[in-house]
Image (cartoon, grey):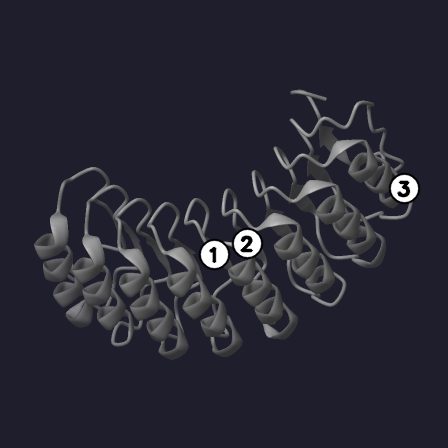
Amino acid sequence: NSTLISLDLTYNKLGSEGGKALADALCKNSTLTSLNLRYNNLGSEGGKALADALCKNSTLIVLNIENNNIGSEGGKALADALCKNSTLTTLDLRNNNLRSEGGKALADALYKNSTLTSLVLSHNNLGSEEGKALADALNKNSTLTALNIEDNNLGSEGGKALADALCKNSMLTYLNLNSNKLGSEGGKALAYALCNNSILKDLNLGGNKLGSFGGKALAGALCKNSTLTKLNICDNQIGFKLYPKNPDLKINQSYGK
């Protein structure tokens, strides 16, 4: 086929063999720009085959392989592919059991990749060290504008590292840190970052146990920050309502105050 540009194969039970067959096709296809393979149980072998295809394909821009259990080995293979691929701009790897090894490899790939603008790594059990690795990468990367690392157990240390990166990064406009156990210390660090960042527009800090101390720090930051337009702080036990100074800022604080 020489005309198809978008293909959605969500929920098709392709398995690793189906993934390999598609990977082979990608090596030869020169028109497809978007491929959605969500929920297909590709496994690590399917993930590695797709990674190999990304090293050869020069047209794919969007790839979604959410919930395919590619594991750390598949994650490492895709990280290697990102170091070589120069066309992919959007990659969704949520819920793939990447764990620390896969997460670290993907963070390292962000040092070398110069085309990816959106990366989703949510629900992958990365941990605080991988949060730090991603933060280090954000200090060097100059293309990523959207990063979703929801539910990765980053903890306060991972949160503080990412906050430090936000003080230096000049590209990221969207950051999702929902459900990462950041705590009040992580919240205070991110509040400080908001005082020094003039790029970020959308920040999700829901479900992070920021507490009243984290809430007060954020309230202070919102008096200084003038670029944020969307902030989610639901379910953080802050105990009081935050009111933005910026009329363009929409705050979601509806659940658990």
Residue 220 is marked as: 3
- The quadrant holding residue 63 is bottom left
Dot 3 falls on a residue whose secondary structure is: helix
Q: Is residue 36 above or below residue 44?
A: above
Density class for disc 1 (Cα within 10 Å; few <14, some 14-19, many ≥20) is some
Amino acid type at mark 1:
Leu
Q: Quadrant of the N terminus?
A: bottom left
- For the residues labelled 1 and 2, say whether their Cβ atoms are less than 8 Å apart: yes
Dot 1 falls on a residue whose secondary structure is: strand
Q: Quadrant of the C terminus?
A: top right
Density class for disc 2 (Cα within 10 Å; few <14, some 14-19, many ≥20) is many
Q: Residue shown at 26%/49% (left/top)?
A: 69
Q: Which residue is mark 1?
A: 119
Q: Residue 33 or 23: which is nearer the viewer?
A: 23
Q: Residue 146 or 2: which is nearer the viewer?
A: 146
- The quadrant holding residue 234 is top right
Density class for disc 3 (Cα within 10 Å; few <14, some 14-19, many ≥20) is some
Q: Is residue 137 above or below residue 152?
A: below
Dot 2 falls on a residue whose secondary structure is: strand
> Disc 2 or disc 3, which is closer to the eye?
3
Reading the chain from its start, which is encountered first: label 2 or label 3? 2
Reading the chain from its start, which is encountered first: label 1 or label 2? 1
Residue 22: percent from left, percent from top? 15, 59
Residue 147: percent from left, percent from top? 55, 54
- The quadrant holding residue 21 is bottom left
Q: Which residue is mark 2?
A: 147
> Disc 3 or disc 1, which is closer to the eye?
3
**Left or right of residue 113, residue 26 in this image:** left
**Left or right of residue 109, residue 236 in this image:** right
Residue 3: percent from left, percent from top? 20, 58
